[in-house]
Image (cartoon, rainbow, N blue to C red):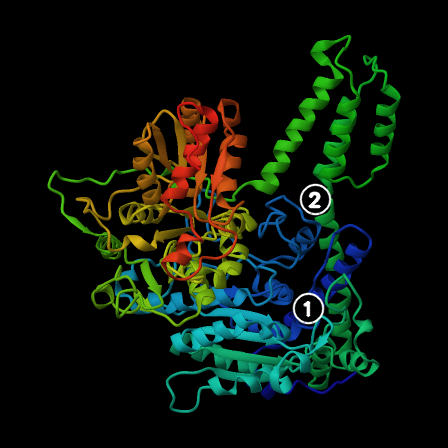
Amino acid sequence: MSNKPIDTTILKDIGLSKKEILNDYKIACESRQVSLLGRREVLTGKAKFGIFGDGKEIPQLAMSRVFKDGDWRSGYYRDQTFAIASGIVTLEELFSQLYGDTDMEANPGNGGRLMNNHFATRTIDEKGEWLDLTKRKNSSADTSPTASQMLRLVGLAQASKIYRGVKDLKEYKNFSNKGNEVAFGTIGDASTSEGIFFEAINAAGVLNIPMVVSVWDDGYGISVPRELQTTKNNISELLKGIERKEGEESGYLIYKAKAWDYPTLIKIYKEGVERSRKEHIPVLYHITECTQPQGHSTSGSHERYKSKERLKFEKEYDGVHKMRQWIIDNSIATEKELSKIEEQSIVTVKEAKKAAWKNFMKPMKKKKKELISILDLTTCNCTKKDKILDIEKELQLVKEPIRKDLISNGKKILRLICNSCSNPNNSLKKNVSKWVKKEVVEGKKAYSEHLYCENDNSALKVVPIAPLFDDDTELVPGREILRDNFDHILSNDPRTLLFGEDVGKIGGVNQTAEGLQEKYGNLRVEDVGIREATIIGQAIGLAMRGLRPIAEIQYFDYLLYALQIMSDDISTLLYRTRGGQKAPLIISTRGHRLEGIWHAGSPLSMVINSLRGMYICVPRNMTQAAGMYNTLLSSDDPALIIEPLNGYRIREKKPKNTGEYKIPLGIPEIMKEGKDITLVTYGSCVRIAQDAVAQLKEFDIDVELIDIQTLLPFDVNHIIAESIKKTNKVLFFDEDVPGGATAFMMQKVLDEQSAFKYLDSEPKTLSAMSHRAAYATDGDYFSNPNSENVFEEIYNIMNEYNPEKYPKVF
């Protein structure tokens, strides 16, 4: 034990008092105890899976000291200590996450929707309205896929640049304080091998935004060592080419430090973040010699792949141990003082664990008691009474029940109860059935609500406004309708942004943004590089900070580069925060019917099955598309709008009320009424269908043509079922692969809308070939359906229905 006085120069050098240093040490000890106790909870069966932040405590303490109100975090599941130190999460909440507690007060970050150590702060209130984000430390909701946090990080940082640079945004003071916010990203060293990491790093360097990235380097990616992950075995060396040199106006500040070197970490985080905040310079911190005392997760042991020498190193250079040693060596505190902190941390964390488990179990035990109390078999004459008693006894033995145990047993009991009862007003079957129904409804609410916006800001609640036309309305190319609509949007709301490849200077490859960059500046109408994933990431981050981005992906086929982040991040954001965060962005693309494999794709089934949580709009022309943009910008729901690629030059009537009319989502339009058969389609296929309908009329076949307009939501008023009631026959038509979106539409109509009972003929689908669209006109002819195919399918259905009137042609 040292009795030397504190060397005040050390405290002055790092700018911290003894009290602040010891408080950091306390947090480090508590975080370590959470990791140790949390792992035990998983191994004893109280939790399903655990992933913790041990070994990363010290650099995260340093980072938390420069994390201010208004700043944002986009990190991952190792940021436990940072979350504690920043007040993003409490110790008790960490255990509530681990248990999957659905109590929103106990687990406000995700309400049981995510595994532990996935953090999120609430940015909207119960009504879906924005909170003041400048007066809180903000954490965007975590995702598990490696490096996916990097994409939205770009947008979170870019928002500061936009708020600082667009003068008309100064009134939006609840989102930014003059653009002084920093976006903090964290990532494991092995995850820097992901392509989206490099894409995001490059994008931020080009944009010159206040993005601060910390790489926690513990030498492994699960079991794979760093030398098999990273060129030069060193991510900061690999990225030397982007380092900002003296006098240069772009590039990163790059810092490198040991994960156990507390004073150096404090200094470099303060220095780098101050510059980033003031000058909007991106910063990279490469934090080496991190450890992972318990291995990757509760799914395995790191002793299987680490050498004895490495395991010894990790003990000697454990960050908490090294910080303790530094405190004593510099006489900042005695060993006795530190022992007291360590002992108290064990008590504090155990109490937090106990409180979290008690809160999790309390409602479950109450439900168990309720179920058992209604199992009154005194009035029951069921022949299977003994089996019911056996289930009740088993239920009594379950000391720590969960919903699954209770509902499953309740349903098993229901199967055994007969329908006769001496007291029908208080029958066992009635009481158990009522209890099961109540619990199923409550369970669905806990695990299913908030997939889409459910408040007054829902796109489904936007009041429709029809486009208005004069008798002598001018006919203009479709692209001009979109361009003028975007112009109106940008002029009326400074929060709206339009960006993508070639969107700025030349106004888009189809001229739908012609002249808009010159009018609104390059912060609001922006050219970006060829990097689809970060285009969507930018949109997510910008939307989370109160802006209204419209992000363009040049062609539908290229959307696949960004499908992962759309599926795992934006479409789940509202759901995984249980209504706590929103990002009302619009992704704009164009698709269908060009030529060749990568310019003619219509992978709608891939999209609709990957993006539940987003709306998918498939307008047939640009007037409809513009109205959908207007609807969505009046709502909080994120969406994908697929403009018909062959419609930009086709002339349409120019609406009088550009920018104001709103097309309702989920409401199909009956393009032509008919009595013989219902034809259901969308997008570019509508024009093909119209051609076929005209041909069929010549053969006395009266087709009812329906344009669904949106795949998600789909026909919310069951208009298609009503049509089939009249025609008793249906063909679903598109240019996706067989079994794709046509199968989706058929299931929706025949199953959910119960239209099967109105059919007099087998329902049919018509799609493209299983292969991708080949090049040139003949390639398209033998790849995608055309009006002749539609004619033949419908004619054959009518032939099967009435062969005398419609004799077989082929």
Is 25 located above or below residue 140 in the figure?
A: below
Q: In the image, is 175 to the left or to the right of 32? A: left
Quarter occupied by the N terminus: bottom right
The x and y percentages for residue 321 are: 74, 77
Q: Earlier in the sequence, mark 2 or mark 1?
A: 1
- Which numbered marker is on residue 626? none
User: Which of the two residues, 491 or 765, is positioned nearer the viewer here?
Assistant: 765
| Residue denoted by label 2 | 359
Residue beneath the point at 66% across and 67% down: 27
Residue beneath the point at 31% across and 36% down: 695
- Dots 2, 1 in contact, CB < 8 A: no
Is 23 located above or below residue 725 in the figure?
A: below
The x and y percentages for residue 129 are: 41, 47
Note whether residue 714 is visible. no
| Residue denoted by label 1 | 26
Residue beneath the point at 78% across and 55% down: 41
Amino acid type, callout 2: Asn
Note whether residue 559 is visible. yes
Amino acid type, callout 1: Lys
Q: Secondary structure at mark 1?
A: helix
Q: In the image, is 516 to the left or to the right of 154? A: left
The x and y percentages for residue 9 are: 59, 88
Which residue of the protein is positioned furthest toward the bottom in this rendering? 246
Is 420 located above or below residue 688 in the figure?
A: above
Front label number (2 vs 1): 2
